[in-house]
């Protein structure tokens, strides 16, 4: 309360701040407040921009992996696909693909990827 509104919580106890006003201030606390961090954990620190940036990094890592797989020697060991960046909440984590032996992308895969 003090950080965001310069309002001391003791003002409510002393009678200088009404319960209604206190409730409005608590409901309108920004996402980076201590209350949001306590209620939502690490996910409270992530903004939409952070999620979009993590998604872009995942796609770039996949594109680099595909480029390396296409341009490697045929006798070389296949490279492991990249792991997605961890997200703070399970709802935004990309779904795990079924376990399968990694294979080199073919022309159809590249045509699909590049549209």
Image (tube, rainbow, N blue to C red):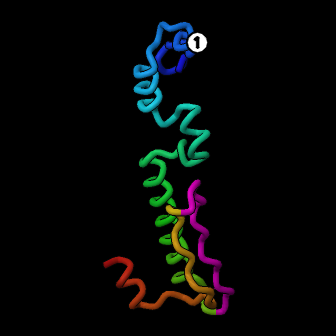
Kindly identify the residue that appears in the image at 56 percent across and 57 percent down.
89
Residue at left 61%, top 39%?
Answer: 38
In depth, the one of 71 and 60 nearer the eye is: 60
> For the view shown, which residue lies furthest in the right direction?
77
> Residue 15 at what x, y percent from top left?
50, 8
- Vertical placement of 32 versus 17: above or below? below
- From which residue to which does the magenta span run? 75-90
Q: Which residue is mark 1?
A: 10
Q: Relative to 35, is 103 above or below? A: below
Residue nearest the viewer, comparing 35 with 67: 35
Q: Going 51% across and 46% down the picture, which residue do you hit?
A: 46
Where residue 77 appears, x then y in whole percent? 68, 86
Quadrant assignment, res 74: bottom right
> What is the crowding at mark 1: few (fewer than 14 residues within 10 Å), some, or many (at least 20)?
few
Eyeballing the image, is 38 above or below 99?
A: above
Residue 17 to residue 60: above or below: above
The verdict on residue 76 being magenta is yes
Residue 19 quadrant: top left
Q: Does 82 appear in magenta?
A: yes
Residue drawn at point x = 48 percent, y = 7 percent: 16
Q: Residue 21 location, x and y as percent?
A: 41, 20
Q: Is residue 18 left or right of residue 80?
A: left
Task: Say left or right for 104 vs 27.
Answer: right
Q: Secondary structure at mark 1?
A: helix
Residue 42 coordinates in the image, percent (x, y) = 60, 46
Quadrant occupied by the C terminus = bottom left
On the image, which quarter does residue 111 sit in? bottom left
Q: Main secondary structure of the magenta part?
A: loop
């Amino acid at each position: 309360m003090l950080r965001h509104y310069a309002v001391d919580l003791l003002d409510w106890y002393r009678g200088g701040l009404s319960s209604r006003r206190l409730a409005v201030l608590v409901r309108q606390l920004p996402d980076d407040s201590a209350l949001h961090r306590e209620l939502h954990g690490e996910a409270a620190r992530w903004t939409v921009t952070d999620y979009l940036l993590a998604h872009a990094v995942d796609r770039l890592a996949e594109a680099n992996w595909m480029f390396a797989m296409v341009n490697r020697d045929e006798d070389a060991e296949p490279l492991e696909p990249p792991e997605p960046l961890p997200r703070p909440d399970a709802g935004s984590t990309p779904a795990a693909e079924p376990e399968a032996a990694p294979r080199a992308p073919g022309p159809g895969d590249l045509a699909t990827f590049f549209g």
